[in-house]
Amino acid sequence: MNINDFIITFAKALKADYFFKNIKIIKPFENVSYAGEIKNTFVCVGLDEMEITPIELGDDTKYANVKIKVGIFTEKNNSAFAKDVFLNICRVSQKFNITSIKAQSLEYVKQAKGYRLNGYFSFGTNIDFGGESGE
C-alpha cells in the first residue's frame, strides 16, 4: 500500500459523502502566518505519524502502523458543528480498516478566529517501498 494513495482515497471518500457536499476537504499545508477569519467549515486530511516494525514481509515490504490526522476547522459561531463533522468522518471511516479513533478537545484558534477539532485515525498495513528506484 502507498500511504499517500490511501490518504487521497480517504479524502475522496469524505468528498463523495453527501454530508460533506458543502465542506472543503484539503491537504495539510505548512504553518504560515494567517490573519483572517474562518468563514466556512473545512477539513484538513494528512499523515500524522507512521511506525514501521522490523518485520519483513518480502524484499521491499514492511508492516507499519499509520495514523492519519484530520483537522476540522469551523467558524466561531458554529463550534458545535465540528463534533458533527467528526462523527460523520467516523461513519465514513468504517469503509476502511481503522483500528483506533481518537479526538482531541475542541479549541479556539485565536489567529483564525474559529474552532479546531483534531481527530486521529489509526490502521495497520503492509507498506511497499517499491525497491531501490522507488517505483
Image (spheres, grey):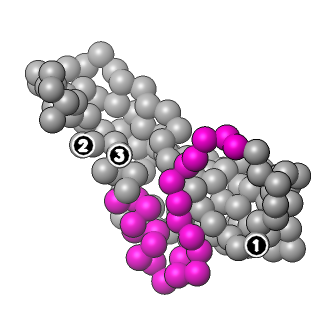
Q: Nearer the viewer, mark 3 or mark 2?
A: 3
From the image, tell me which residue sits under label 3.
4
Residue 31, image x, y percentages: 67, 41
The reply to whether residue 114 is visible in this rendering is no
Q: Is residue 28 positioned above or below 132 on the image?
A: below
From the image, tell me which residue sits under label 2.
1
Q: Quadrant of residue 56?
A: top left
Marks 1/2: CA–CA distance: 36 Å
Q: Secondary structure at mark 2?
A: loop
Q: Nearer the viewer, mark 1 or mark 2?
A: 1
Residue 8, image x, y percentages: 37, 56
Q: Amino acid at mark 3?
A: Asn
Q: Is residue 89 magenta?
A: no
Tag 3 and tag 1, C-beta contact below 8 Å: no
Quarter of the figure that contains the C terminus: top left
Residue 120, image x, y percentages: 57, 47
- Rate crowding at label 2 as few (under 14), some (14 to 19) or many (20 or more) other CA atoms within 10 Å: few
The mark that comes first in sequence, 1 or 2, is 2
- Rate crowding at label 3 as few (under 14), some (14 to 19) or many (20 or more) other CA atoms within 10 Å: few
Q: Is residue 116 positioned above or below 85 on the image?
A: above
Callout count: 3
Residue lying furthest left: 59
Q: Quadrant of residue 125?
A: top left
Q: Nearer the viewer, mark 3 or mark 1?
A: 1
What stretch of residues is rendered in magenta? 9-32
Q: Quadrant of residue 63?
A: top left
Marks 3/2: CA–CA distance: 9 Å
